[in-house]
Image (cartoon, rainbow, N blue to C red):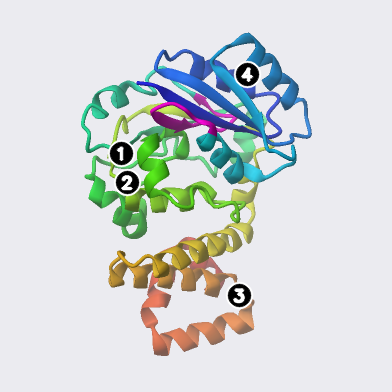
């Protein structure tokens, strides 16, 4: 196997060394692609030192050397990758020694486009654990049992908690399958949940198989500066950001001719439920009454997510 591991780097001076060291342990890793995204700290200097020390490390910045976000950085990494397989890692996370154990066997089957595993949690400090334990009270982010590849896309849409979820950190995909079947790759228009939107589309176009899902193959590093964990504690931001996510998913689904009508309808209703949830109270109740008459299932879809319920109770 020749794996290219793509690591977008922003404000990760304290963590990037550990992330890179966790990847260098694997002989299967052909190259580590660091995309430095105009960090305000000394992350660029650390990346330069790492690239000088290890021939497998390749360092890139965007052409204008400005900040473009995680999506654009991952896309640049995919364009620069020359390995047969691509894996991703956030700069404050790290791989465990079993990260590619399942991949070695599963990718022998030509039908396998991608493999996903389970993600654990590492708190970098007691303060981080105190602040964010409620966000990561479940120590394992994983799909709850082994599903076939055709079940992954509807499982994420319909089964929610009973299906589980997987992380971009635990995903390995064939480069050719990714480049040929995914257009666009990561959407630069999304600043939050860009990986979730990507995984929705990826699981529709590619055949993804479970690897190790009963124990972690990588760890999410949680610290006080985590952007996504701070947002997780904000009562309003998850509703707004998920509304934007489902808007993007809905636009894609309505334009994708091969998606069955019932799935398009479900996605549209999920988008509609978040639109209702984020609306101000006068408008919210007008929308609720409207859809109780025109499409009550939009309300029913909304009642399955806690953010929606909390805004109307």
Marked residue nearer the N-terminal end (2 or 1):
1
Please, is residue 135 above or below residue 243 in the view?
above
- Is 91 contained in the magenta span? yes
* Mark in front: 4 vs 3: 4
Whole-Å distance between the Cαs marked 2 and 1? 6 Å
* Mark in front: 4 vs 1: 1
Q: Residue, x 75% and y 41% (percent of image)?
A: 66
Marked residue nearer the N-terminal end (3 or 2):
2
Please, is residue 156 above or below residue 144 in the view?
below
Q: Residue, x 30% and y 32% (percent of image)?
A: 211
Q: Residue, x 63% and y 50% (percent of image)?
A: 231
Q: Secondary structure at mark 2?
A: loop
* Mark in front: 4 vs 2: 2
| Label total for image | 4
- Depth check: 294 or 17 in front? 17
Which region of the structure is painted magenta? 80-94
Please, is residue 216 above or below residue 258 in the view?
above
Q: According to the image, label 4 marks what residue?
A: 17
Label ID, residue 279: 3
Q: According to the image, label 2 marks what residue?
A: 206
The image shows residue 59 at horizontal and vertical percentages of 63, 25
Q: Secondary structure at mark 1?
A: loop
The image shows residue 159 at horizontal and vertical percentages of 31, 56
**Mark 2 and mark 1 residues within 8 Å of each other at the beta carbon:** yes
- Depth check: 58 or 149 in front? 58
Q: Pointer 4: residues within 10 angstroms few (<14), some, or many (20+)?
A: some
């Amino acid at each position: 196997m020749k794996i290219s591991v793509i690591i977008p780097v922003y404000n990760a001076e304290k963590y990037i060394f550990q992330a890179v060291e966790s990847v260098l342990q694997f002989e299967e890793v052909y190259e580590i692609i660091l995309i430095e995204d105009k960090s305000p700290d000394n992350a660029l200097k650390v990346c330069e030192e790492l690239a000088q020390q290890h021939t497998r490390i390749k360092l890139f910045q965007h052409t204008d050397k400005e900040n473009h976000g995680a999506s654009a950085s991952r896309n640049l990494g995919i364009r620069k990758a020359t390995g047969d397989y691509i894996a991703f890692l956030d700069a404050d996370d790290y791989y465990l020694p079993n990260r590619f154990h399942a991949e070695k066997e599963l990718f022998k089957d030509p039908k396998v486009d991608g493999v996903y595993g389970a993600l654990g949690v590492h708190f970098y400090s007691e303060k981080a654990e105190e602040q964010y334990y409620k966000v990561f009270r479940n120590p394992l982010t994983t799909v709850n049992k082994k599903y076939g590849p055709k079940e992954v896309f509807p499982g994420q849409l319909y089964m929610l908690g009973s299906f589980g979820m997987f992380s971009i950190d635990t995903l390995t995909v064939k480069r050719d399958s990714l480049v040929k079947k995914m257009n666009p790759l990561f959407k630069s228009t999304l600043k939050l949940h860009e990986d979730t939107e990507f995984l929705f589309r990826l699981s529709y176009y590619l055949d993804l198989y479970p690897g190790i899902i009963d124990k972690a193959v990588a760890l999410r590093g949680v610290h006080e500066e985590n952007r996504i964990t701070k947002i997780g504690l904000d009562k309003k931001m998850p509703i707004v950001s998920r509304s934007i996510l489902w808007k993007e998913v809905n636009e894609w689904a309505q334009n994708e001719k091969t998606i069955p009508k019932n799935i398009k309808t479900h996605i549209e209703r999920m988008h509609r439920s978040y639109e209702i949830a984020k609306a101000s109270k006068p408008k919210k109740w007008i929308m609720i009454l409207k859809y109780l008459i025109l499409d009550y299932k939009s309300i029913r879809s909304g009642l399955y997510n806690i953010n929606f319920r909390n805004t109307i109770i």
